[in-house]
Image (cartoon, helix red, strand yellow):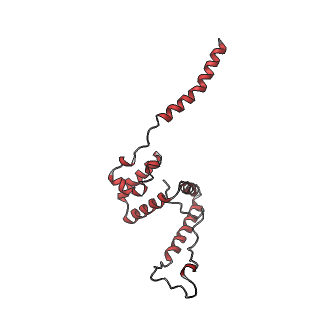
Amino acid sequence: MAKTCVALIVSLCLAFPVVAAQSKTETKKPVRPTWSELTPAQQKILAPLGTEWNRMDATRRKKWIAIAERYPKMKPQEQQRLQKNMTEWAKLTPEQRKAAREKYQKLKNLPPDKRREVSTQWQRYQRSLAAQPEISPSDAPAPPESQPAESQPAESPPAPPTAAEAPASTPQP
């Protein structure tokens, strides 16, 4: 009798997690809010993320909704920057997004003095980019007669900052 009870208890212990896991997967609720449940204003603000929205988890959706709520209070320049950043974020592959989040977490965990140093380096890099004149195609010098335009070596911009030089203040939702 005792052996039967022990066997029954063991089998129930082994079966319970399987049943619980099956019920969780079968009754999995869709992540809310869906894109269609957002207000028209939220959809307009978050438009660059529209194609990605239904693949995001609930935590990320909440973060983006919070950003959309702050959006009307932002200065126009901040709004433009946010729209640009969202567009660039939507273009990243899942692997690139993961790498960006990891880099952000590393920077976030740096000591304050190291973060200031990285921020200073990043600002210098940004100023160096801004100081470079933008050449429109009509202003560009003509290639020499001896070489076709296709074989001209392209000028490369300065190398982007390393992981230690990336901005420490950019949120990664």
Location of residue 160 in the rendering, given as x and y in whole percent from the top left corner = 57, 68
- Apparent side of residue 46 relative to residue 101 in the rendered image (left or right): left
- Residue located 47% across and 48% down the image: 55
- Residue located 50% across and 34% down the image: 24
Quadrant in the picture for the N terminus: top right
Location of residue 49 in the rendering, given as x and y in whole percent from the top left corner = 43, 55
* Residue 137 vs residue 173, the one in the foreground: 137
Q: Residue furthest right?
A: 3
Location of residue 13 in the rendering, given as x and y in whole percent from the top left corner = 60, 25
Q: Is residue 148 above or below residue 31?
A: below
Q: Is residue 11 above or below residue 1?
A: below
Q: Residue furthest left?
A: 40
Q: Residue furthest top?
A: 1
Q: Which image quadrant for residue 101?
A: bottom right
- Residue located 32% across and 52% down the image: 40
Q: Is residue 30 above or below residue 3?
A: below
Location of residue 47 in the rendering, given as x and y in whole percent from the top left corner = 39, 56
Q: Which image quadrant for residue 151?
A: bottom right
Q: How many marks?
A: 0
* Residue 109 vs residue 113, the one in the foreground: 109
- Apparent side of residue 115 relative to residue 2 in the rendered image (left or right): left
